[in-house]
């Protein structure tokens, strides 16, 4: 593919040297360091009990003392902002400046431009989250003095990979808006509107829809209540934020055996032992596939629209 490597290098240089990247990186670092410090303080208060229960190192990313949310909550909330900030002006800003037509006048294929921008943003997201994860892990190791086991390392790697996919979805959505809308402000507002709706309003609407389709009260049988909860959860999983949160819980909490409501009879025969890494990945796998599919769908639509878009020199 002619021109992919030059476009990739140019976009990476723009990302890592821009003030936008520095601000986002500093924001995530401050939030992550604060959450990890608070979690480490709470873990050190009962380190003997945590050693007996196992998976002490994972608690650096999931524990909270009520003052600050855990690190995973910060990623769930701030991750979409990173993706939207990296892609909302990927195409329309170059069109408004007239640089896109100049780039395409060179021996560079049009698909190399969109592919290079997407790959550069994914690499930027991956390096950002990886460096922050290593920084927080080093701080936590220094404070609690308990190294991670192989099981915990596998779970943390899976969590970081899932976070990259989650942020990449919002980035691909913002790139799509940058192709659809000519103004960068409009594409940024559209991305923010989708993020706010999917994160805050969609779960509430899913509950309202479930109440309307399967109403419940104090005298409702258990089977109907279970059906109501299953419907509400199914509708809420149409939001990428819900998919990410549930998959994160399954990966970082080895004791989680299912992500849906179950009856007491279904728990008979279950052992209280934590699941292995592979078994936890099986629980979270449908959510992971859903996030990957949403990301690829957004990128595919962006690819087709960009390839068919008329670009003129201004």
Image: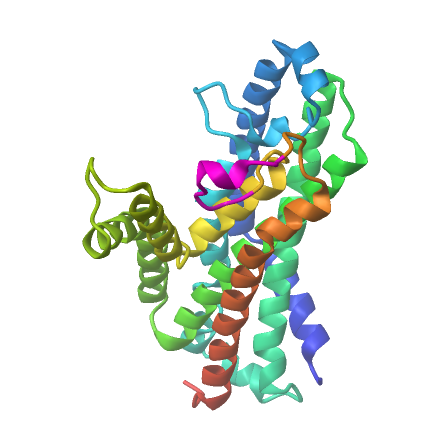
Q: Is residue 90 left or right of residue 210?
A: right
Task: Point out the stretch of residues depicted in magenta.
Answer: 258-270
Q: Position of residue 179 (x, y in %)?
A: 42, 76
Between residue 114 and residue 278, name the one nearer to us: 278
Q: Which residue is pictured at 45% across the width and 42% down the height? A: 262
Q: Quadrant of residue 10?
A: bottom right
Q: For the image shown, how many numbered marks are present on the structure?
A: 0
| Residue 28 versus residue 142 in the image, above or below | below
- Residue 134 within the magenta-colored segment of the rendering: no
Residue at image x 49%, y 68%?
A: 90
**Most common secondary structure along the magenta stretch:** loop
Position of residue 71 relative to residue 292, above or below, is above
- x, y percent for residue 4: 68, 77
Rendered residue at 68%/21% (across/down):
53
The quadrant of the picture occupied by the C terminus is bottom left
Residue 27 visible to the viewer = no
Q: Nearer the viewer, residue 75 or 148?
A: 148
Q: Is residue 51 left or right of residue 165?
A: right
Q: x, y percentage for residue 184?
A: 37, 66
Can residue 313 be seen here? yes
In the image, residue 261 lies in the stretch drawn in magenta: yes
Point out the image quarter for the N terminus.
bottom right
């Amino acid at each position: 593919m002619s021109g992919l490597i030059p476009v990739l290098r140019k976009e990476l240089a723009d990302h890592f040297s821009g003030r936008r990247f520095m601000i986002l990186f500093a924001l995530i670092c401050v939030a992550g360091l604060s959450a990890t410090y608070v979690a480490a303080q709470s873990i050190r208060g009962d380190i003997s009990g945590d050693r007996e229960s196992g998976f002490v190192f994972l608690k650096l990313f999931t524990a909270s003392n009520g003052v600050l949310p855990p690190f995973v909550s910060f990623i769930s909330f701030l991750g979409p902002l990173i993706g939207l900030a990296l892609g909302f002006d990927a195409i329309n800003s170059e069109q408004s400046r007239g640089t896109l037509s100049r780039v395409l006048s060179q021996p560079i294929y049009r698909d190399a431009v969109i592919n290079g921008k997407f790959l550069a943003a994914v690499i930027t997201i991956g390096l950002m989250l990886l460096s922050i994860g290593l920084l927080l892990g080093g701080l936590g190791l220094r404070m609690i003095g308990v190294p991670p086991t192989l099981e915990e390392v596998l779970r943390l790697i899976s969590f970081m990979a899932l976070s990259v996919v989650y942020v990449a979805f919002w980035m691909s959505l913002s790139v799509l808006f940058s192709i659809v809308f000519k103004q960068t402000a409009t594409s940024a507002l559209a991305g923010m509107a989708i993020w706010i709706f999917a994160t805050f309003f969609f779960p509430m609407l899913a509950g309202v829809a479930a109440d309307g389709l399967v109403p419940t009260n104090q005298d409702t049988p258990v089977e109907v209540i279970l059906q109501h909860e299953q419907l509400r959860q199914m509708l809420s999983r149409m939001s990428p934020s819900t998919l990410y949160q549930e998959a994160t819980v399954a990966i970082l909490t080895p004791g989680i055996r299912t992500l849906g409501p179950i009856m007491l009879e279904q728990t008979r025969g279950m052992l209280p032992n934590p699941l292995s890494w592979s078994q936890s990945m099986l629980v979270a796998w449908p959510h992971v596939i859903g996030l990957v599919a949403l990301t690829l769908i957004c990128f595919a639509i962006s690819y087709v629209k960009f390839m068919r878009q008329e670009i003129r020199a201004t």
